[in-house]
Amino acid sequence: MSGGETHYAGVGILMSKRAKNSCLAVYYISDRIMAARFRLRKGSLLFVSVYAPTSTATDDIINNFYSQPQDVINSNKKNCDTLVVAGDFNAKLGNQRIPLVMGPHGYGDRNSRGDRLVDFCMVNNLTAAHSWFPNRSSHKVTWISRARNARNAIDHILNSTEARKHFTDCRSYSACFDTDHRLVICNLKWKFRRHATARGQRPQHPNVEALKSEQSSEVFWQLVRSRVTQGDSLEAVACVIHEVSLETCGTQNIPEETAVPV
């Protein structure tokens, strides 16, 4: 969970046991942003969870908010990554078709915050999952006012456009607890892959000898600093160090009886 000591705002990522076993790293960015990387059978998944300021926030606050997930993507997304950005964007995307970003089955009218979200999608090759399925209107609404006189679609699941073929459905459901939001679920045909130690496979060990090179050492520490944020757990920091060391140093074969986890 993000949110810091004040517990204001805050987002979280709930994982199944299988997802937890395939989690490579967790990034705690701010009280409104966190991210995690998962190993898939093919490639990997960078999942970003967000909670945007309300539509009454100033443009400066909105721009500062969008700069945070953009920094996460720029710093952590790899070529093999599928990107998912999901959460309460407090933005209405509307029902107008936009090539690659919006399919033919949107909902309502787009507002100015929706325009900002469309720009974010275009920069990062993201598409709104719900807009590709002809579900009824009640399954596209994600927020209903307490007075029940206003309905909007402001919570979204945005996926890499190249991954759209893996979508099978995306719709909202009534929540089983007291909230004015509805749950949004997107079904995707992805399979998580366990860490290399599963099924008798040997773990990967970085070739630490490569760090004797001043250039490699500098690249290593720059990547670590860019991916570790204040408040990260020791487990998350260890995952980042291991991941970066494999990227910058490559791997080496160590006899199983002498292998030491890094």
Image (cartoon, rainbow, N blue to C red):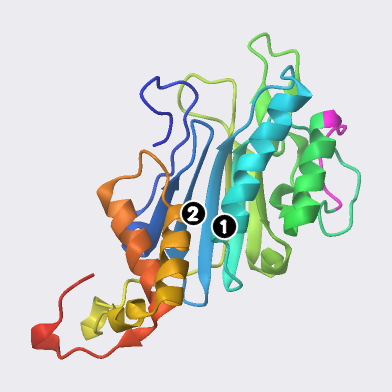
Q: Nearer the viewer, residue 142 or 223?
A: 223
Query: Do callouts 1 and 2 mark residues in contact (Cβ within 8 Å)?
Result: yes
Q: CA distance from mark 1 to mark 2?
A: 7 Å
Residue at image location 36% in from the left, 38% down from the top: 231
At 52% from the left and 63% from the top, the residue drawn is: 45
Q: Is residue 79 visible?
A: yes
Q: Residue at x 42, y 45 (%)?
A: 229
Q: Main secondary structure of the magenta part?
A: loop
The percent coordinates of residue 234 (x first, y second) are 26, 49
| Residue under label 1 | 75
Secondary structure under tag 2 reads helix
Q: Residue at x 35, y 82 (%)?
A: 210
Q: Does 105 appear in magenta?
A: yes
Rendered image quadrant of residue 22: bottom left
Number of residues whose C-alpha sits closer than 10 Å to that of mark 1, classed few (under 14), some (14–19) or many (20 or more): few
Nearest the viewer among 107 and 213 is: 213
| Quadrant occupied by the N terminus | top left
- Look at the image and tell me in which quarter the C terminus lies: bottom left
* Magenta-tinted stretch: 104-112
Residue type indicated by callout 1: Ser
Extreme residue in the front direction: 214
Please tell me the numbered disc located at residue 226: 2
Upstream in sequence: badge 1 or badge 2: 1
